[in-house]
Image (cartoon, rainbow, N blue to C red):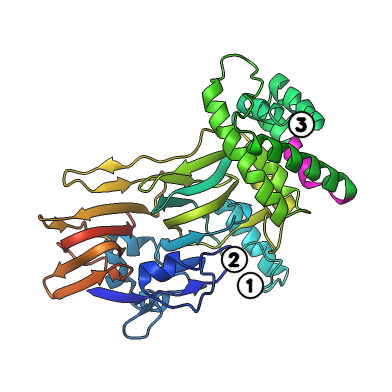
Amino acid sequence: MLRRLDNPVRKYAWGSRTHIARMCGLDFGGDKVAEMWLGAHPGAPSVLDDARPLHEAIAADAATFLGPVVSGRGDRLPFLMKLLAAAEPLSLQVHPTTERARRRFAEQDAAGIDITAPERSYQDESHKPEMIYALTRFEGMAGFRDVTKTAAILRGLGVAWLDELATRLEQTDDAAGTLHETVTWILAMHGPDLAGRMQEVQVAAAMAESTSHRPTPRLRPATVAADEVQRESIRVYAALGPLIDQYPDDPGVLVTLLLNHVVLAPGEAMFIDAGVVHAYTSGFGVEIMASSDNVLRAGLTPKHVDVEELLEITAFTPVPPPTLAPAVDEDGTRVFRPPVDEFELAVHEVGPHPLTLPQAPQIAVCLVGSVDLVTADGKAQLHRGDAVFVDGTEVGVEVRGTGRLAIGRTPA
């Protein structure tokens, strides 16, 4: 069956007043709405048109809702989708592996920490790999940048202690170890020492940002491409001022100097695996992840910060920006397939020729236009912002109409 979904929203301080409201044709009274959850996570489940929360309906009849393959793995929907709208930066955060989540969840349960307690870091026993698909220009920071590039960007600010850090990064034979030591040192900063360093960095970034011909950072070694570092430098310098204004006492701001600054155009995506430090800063997109709410925060948030745990689970090895290219099926559908078992995201451009969906438990949300999902028993018409759950037993679901459809699903 096709089951229409009523989806809950989260009104976080970093959310947008417009993106989700416009997409879904809803009036939130001008409130900031950060996320709309589409799925069966018990923390904020979608509700079916018969008033049942999706996670309860699945638990009562997993064979039908999840289908023969996925129900064999358990009685829960493996993925969670969200519409995510960031008008301000999200927290600087990292997600655990499944092994770590199971162990720490059990430990926090045994310690008697209530699941709703603000100091509780583990909400469930799952890892939380995630992917963001951009609907607008989308910016964020993800993973530690190549240390030679970082050294060049730090030197471009002309601050003595950043020059010293740049030298350590250039001369290290153990990039991951040096980054671990550096982040540990930064996150321990406080009081007048932190305030002085933040002020130095803010002034230097403002000078660079206000100069029409921004200085090219001093590159060591010469093999680093100047234009590539220059582009990244501009993004880094532009982000620092607003971050320091918003979080003047938060050393997590300084950690962002070490991270890849990623800009996605509409239709592009990036994938965040366990251990990858990241923070989204602005934009609107479709997010899909393993069905988990495990978040370890290091800063840029009024929520609970767990620096000790974050330092233990973070991957400090430098990585390229974690963008993810889609595969293109024969019918033109773009399918983003990250290296996880729980989810993939298909984006259908629906036109003159009907498309047929594979059999899988899936959630479809209309992004543009008007689209019909048709089965032997009937159809569901989706307009922009509408969403529907497709049972895992449905075979041969056709997609017709004119528009764009995003479908999150668990691969068979």
Which element type, helix, strand or loop, lies under badge 3? helix
Which quadrant is home to the N terminus?
bottom left
Which is in the foreground here, disc 3 or disc 2? 3
The residue pinned by badge 2 equals 123
Q: Quadrant of the C terminus?
A: bottom left
Compare marks 3 and 2 and give the one earlier in the sequence. 2
Q: Residue furthest front?
A: 212
In the image, taking residue 358 as reference, residue 20 lies left or right, namely right
Q: CA distance from mark 3 to mark 2?
A: 37 Å
43 and 256: which is toward the camera: 256
Spatial CA span between label 2 and label 1: 6 Å
Q: Earlier in the sequence, mark 1 or mark 3?
A: 1
Q: Is residue 22 left or right of residue 374?
A: right
- Crowd tier of the residue under label 1, counting other residues whose Cα lies within 10 Å: few below 14, some 14–19, many 20 or above: some
Furthest residue toward right: 192
Disc nearer the start of the sequence (2/1): 1
Question: For mark 3, does the 10 Å Cα neighbourhood hold few (<14), some (14 to 19), or many (20 or more) residues?
Answer: some
> Is residue 30 shown left or right of residue 202?
left
- The answer, for residue 91, to whether it is visible in the render is yes
The residue where tag 1 is placed is 115
Measured as percent of width and height from the top left, residue 44 is found at 49, 73
Q: Quadrant of residue 21?
A: bottom left
Residue occupied by mark 3: 162
Q: Which residues are magenta?
A: 182-191
